[in-house]
Image (tube, rainbow, N blue to C red):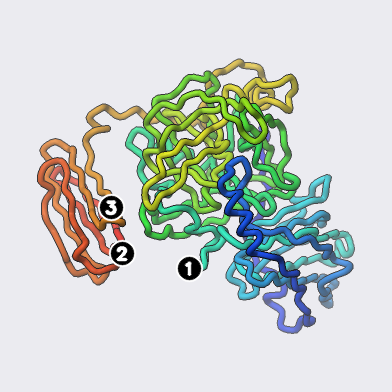
């Protein structure tokens, strides 16, 4: 079994935090750059989905253990090296090391000046033959790096920072203060929002296969993917056009999922406590014909992360519907669904005039954006049939713009080209089984059973609540036979402001007379069951 079990521990704290007397240190101030020029470029580049979504500006530096920072040595021979880097106005900062080689027992932490955001410890498990490393993001513009070296391995560490990435957008919302939270459009649905009883159980498993990628100053999405050996090989599918710098320095985050989802509304998503990150990858295969890239994650995956390796379908048959799971604009994980079968489409994309794709005509739930590139599209069995290449889909308020997206076809990626580096087949079918489909694999080594498809009655009979912020109208639908739905609306202080029953199969409730603010709608069914959904009325519409 090929299992990677190294990762950022996200445990412990830097040694200096427990020491009162340390050497003073002058911060390293990063040079200014023309942010207005960068933003003007983004206005143009964001319309081109053939390039990954840029969130940061790359500042080249040469800062290492021997030419920057300060050392503090203790009586027992242990020592720490610290450097303080300030890039004024940055929302986040991340780092690219062109030299990273530290001995067993040594640690590297990265944290902001007020110690509200901490990464690490990075340890010897991230040592690579090319001695490169890319870190995850730290919030703020004033950041510290701290290297601890035990006396027993004194002088064996080698560190040099080659690039500082000044995050100027998308990785922190100024109003929310969580990395990337709230950066995508209002029509997006958090991954824990319902997409239909015929897929919700599968979605709740597949979301654990999806990873958010930091590739230097850009972001993309990808998916852990199973192979016929069912050995948890750390294979990760994304798009060929997701490209910036060496994959050795890319960083990955899993299970960034809101515990309080926003479902196509103006409500902010709540951040997640999990910070499951790893770094470093190797390209195994890629081709422009289907905009495919397959990576091997080198930094490791923790067994406690409860991950899923997604299955796949290489038949090239169009499914009845598709679902995508992704990180638009570097935001917390989202979901989208299209109920019309995708169609095969030759796309002039990124210099390849005949890229073979699936065309998604118009999303019925959610949408994709820049940053979603590379994310998988799943069939009704939860199997990958492609990865996002590009498209014109975007939000228009809390609705989408009714434009299409295009996904590189998995069946084309399967055996394209003449070399192992061109196609998926050598990696995903190493034993030559010629399987046309493969199911997902859990991190405990089991193959989760595919849920029993719901009956037509189960698909039809449900109670749902929808809110249109632009009109301040709540719509409650009731298609359950012999069910009486009652509703109660409370303001944020808990006072009842409206109540009633749903007459027929649908009822619209007009809130335009209500003042701006948050309200809670309590739904109760006579056949059993209830739920509460919050809505926000904004009279500025």
Vertical side of 30 occupied by 362: above or below: above
Q: Indicate the position of residue 428 as horizontal and vertical percent values.
A: 63, 26
Q: Secondary structure at mark 1?
A: loop
Q: Between tags 2 and 3, which lies in front?
A: 2
Q: Can see residue 278? A: no
- Whichever of callouts 2 and 3 sits on the residue coming sooner in the sequence is 3
Q: Is residue 203 left or right of residue 23?
A: left
Q: Are marks 2 and 3 in contact (CB under 8 Å)?
A: no
Q: At 52% across and 33% down in the image, what residue appears?
A: 406
Q: Indicate the position of residue 166 as horizontal and vertical percent values.
A: 67, 63
- Whichever of callouts 1 and 2 sits on the residue coming sooner in the sequence is 1
- Which quadrant is home to the C terminus? bottom left
- Whichever of callouts 1 and 3 sits on the residue coming sooner in the sequence is 1
Number of residues whose C-alpha sits closer than 10 Å to that of mark 2, classed few (under 14), some (14–19) or many (20 or more)? some
Q: CA distance from mark 2 to mark 3?
A: 12 Å
Q: Can see residue 485? A: yes
Vertical side of 377 occupied by 21: above or below: below
Residue 490, quarter of the rendered image:
bottom left
**Residue wearing tag 3:** 467
Number of residues whose C-alpha sits closer than 10 Å to that of mark 1, classed few (under 14), some (14–19) or many (20 or more)? few
Q: Which mark is residue 87?
A: none
Q: Secondary structure at mark 3?
A: strand
Q: Which mark is residue 175?
A: 1
- Foreground residue, 485 or 327? 327
Vertical side of 414 occupied by 448: above or below: below
Q: At 82% across and 70% down in the image, what residue appears?
A: 78
Q: Between tags 1 and 2, which lies in front?
A: 2
Q: Are marks 1 and 2 in contact (CB under 8 Å)?
A: no
**Residue wearing tag 2:** 538
């Amino acid at each position: 079994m090929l299992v990677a079990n190294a990762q950022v521990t996200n445990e412990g704290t830097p040694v200096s935090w427990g020491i009162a007397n340390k050497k003073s240190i002058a911060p390293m101030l990063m040079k200014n750059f023309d942010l207005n020029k960068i933003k003007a470029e983004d206005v143009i580049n964001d319309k081109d989905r053939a390039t990954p979504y840029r969130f940061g500006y790359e500042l080249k530096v040469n800062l290492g253990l021997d030419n920057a920072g300060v050392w503090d040595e203790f009586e027992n021979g242990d020592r720490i090296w610290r450097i303080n880097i300030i890039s004024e106005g940055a929302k986040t900062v991340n780092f690219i090391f062109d030299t990273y080689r530290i001995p067993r027992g040594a640690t590297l932490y990265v944290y902001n000046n007020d110690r509200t955001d901490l990464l690490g410890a990075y340890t010897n498990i991230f040592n690579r033959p090319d001695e490169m490393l890319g870190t995850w993001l730290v919030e703020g513009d004033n950041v510290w790096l701290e290297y601890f070296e035990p006396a027993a391995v004194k002088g064996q560490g080698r560190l040099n920072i080659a690039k500082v990435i000044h995050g100027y957008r998308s990785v922190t919302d100024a109003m929310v203060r969580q990395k990337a939270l709230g950066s995508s459009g209002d029509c997006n649905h958090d991954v824990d929002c319902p997409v239909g009883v015929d897929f919700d159980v599968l979605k709740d498993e597949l979301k654990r296969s999806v990873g958010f990628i930091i590739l230097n100053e850009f972001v993309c999405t990808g998916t852990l993917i199973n192979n016929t050996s069912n050995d948890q090989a750390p294979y990760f599918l994304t798009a060929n056009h997701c490209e910036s710098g060496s994959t050795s320095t890319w960083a990955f985050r899993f299970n960034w999922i809101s515990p309080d989802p926003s479902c196509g509304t103006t409500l902010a998503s709540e951040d997640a406590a999990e910070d499951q990150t790893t770094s470093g990858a190797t390209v195994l295969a890629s081709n422009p014909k289907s905009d495919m890239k397959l990576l091997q994650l080198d930094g490791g995956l923790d067994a406690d992360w409860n991950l899923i390796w997604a299955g796949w379908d290489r038949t090239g048959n169009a499914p009845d519907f598709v679902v995508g799971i992704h990180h638009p604009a570097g935001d917390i994980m989202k979901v989208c669904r299209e109920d019309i079968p995708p169609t095969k489409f030759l796309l002039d994309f990124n210099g390849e005039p005949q890229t073979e794709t699936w065309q998604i005509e118009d999303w019925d739930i959610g949408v994709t954006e820049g940053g979603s590139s590379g994310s998988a599209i799943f069939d009704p069995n939860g199997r990958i049939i492609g990865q996002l290449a590009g498209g014109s889909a975007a939000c228009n308020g809390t609705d989408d713009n009714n434009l299409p997206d295009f996904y590189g076809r998995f069946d084309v990626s399967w055996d394209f080209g003449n070399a192992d580096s061109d196609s998926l087949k050598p990696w995903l079918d190493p034993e030559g089984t010629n399987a046309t489909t493969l199911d997902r694999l859990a991190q405990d080594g089991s193959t989760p059973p595919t849920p029993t498809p719901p009956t037509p009655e189960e698909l039809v009979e449900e109670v749902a609540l929808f809110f249109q912020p632009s009109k301040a109208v709540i719509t409650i639908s009731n298609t359950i036979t012999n069910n009486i739905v009652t509703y109660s609306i409370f303001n944020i202080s808990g006072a009842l402001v409206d109540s009633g029953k749903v007459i027929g199969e649908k009822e619209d409730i007009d809130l335009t007379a209500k003042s701006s603010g948050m309200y809670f709608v309590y739904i109760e069914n006579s056949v059993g069951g209830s739920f509460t959904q919050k809505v926000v009325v904004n009279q500025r519409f």
